[in-house]
Image (tube, grey):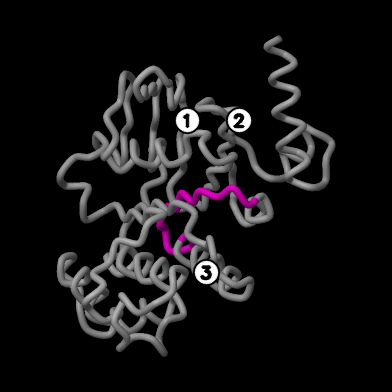
Amino acid sequence: MDTSTPAVDIRNLNVRRGPHRALEDVTVTIPRGSVTGLLGPSGCGKTTLMRCIVGTQIIESGTVTVLDRPAGEANLRRRVGYVTQEPSVYPDLTVAKNVAYFAALYGRSGAVVDETIAAVGLSSHSKQLAGNLSGGQLGRVSLACALVGDPELLVLDEPTVGLDPVLRVELWDHFHMLADRGVTLLISSHVMDEADRCAQLLLLREGRLLGKLTPGDLREQTGESRLEDAFLRLIRTREGAQS
């Protein structure tokens, strides 16, 4: 795996939506083969930043480079997987056929379909129509459709929302297994207890990047043991410095 350049390199990124600036002067890199958490309250710009990385967001200024190419470039489509908060599957197809369809798009087939369905805990539902599944199950089908392409970069927007604790742990174990294989993962969440499962954290607040640091560094800088308290302390410290 080439680690000489980051998987994602963002420079002076600004995004405006009407009169509102969704992202303000964001500069950050994401190393290859890592699990990076994108954390912050709802509405802070997490989804907007992810859309910039996968190339579906119009930006005002700045640059976003993904796997050494401009974000959104055509040849990145097979190299980047993206799972949105809303399920993106075909409700009139079974779980297996949904995953097999996306596998075919990526030129993959055979056992990889069953293996991917098993990885998201849906083997017992593989013959069910996606339209008959629960919201949490649909989210897992979307995740399987992204995983089956074996992407180099996997961008996941709150993938564990609505999942039971056991399945959340199993999915995070799978994410780390992918990172060990060299896949880069960017995972957004507003649940701070998931932050400890990330190698590094990107902390967003009102469209601004408050910091890029490890969970241990965040605790050390703030003197707080609970990551939620540490994040709040960091916010207050930064806001106090700016006032």
* 239 in relation to 49, above or below: above
Residue at x-position 62% and y-position 57%: 197
Res. 173 mark: none
Could you give the CA–CA distance between mark 2 and mark 1, rounded to whole angstroms? Answer: 9 Å
Secondary structure category for the residue under label 2: strand
Q: Residues within 10 Å of mark 3 (few under 14, many from 20)?
A: some
User: What residue type is disc 2 on?
Assistant: Gly
Residue 193 rendering spot, x and y as whole percentages: 68, 55
* 180 in relation to 116, above or below: above
Res. 28 mark: 1
* 135 in relation to 193, above or below: below
Q: Quadrant of the C terminus?
A: top right
For residue 118, side relative to residue 72 (left or right)? right
Please name whichever residue, 205 or 37, is drawn nearer the observer in this view of the structure: 205
Query: Mark 1 or mark 3, which is nearer to you?
Result: 3
For the record, the magenta segment spans 179-191
Residue 91 rendering spot, x and y as whole percentages: 26, 72
Residue at x-position 35% and y-position 65%: 142
Residue 72 rendering spot, x and y as whole percentages: 23, 40
Res. 211 mark: 2
Q: Compare marks 2 and 1 and give the one earlier in the sequence.
A: 1
Displayed quadrant of residue 9: top left
Displayed quadrant of residue 110: bottom left
Could you give the CA–CA distance between mark 1 and mark 3, rounded to whole angstroms? Answer: 26 Å
Could you give the CA–CA distance between mark 2 and mark 3, rounded to whole angstroms? Answer: 26 Å
Displayed quadrant of residue 202: top right
Check disc 3 and report the residue beneath it.
171
User: Residue lying furthest top in this view?
Assistant: 243
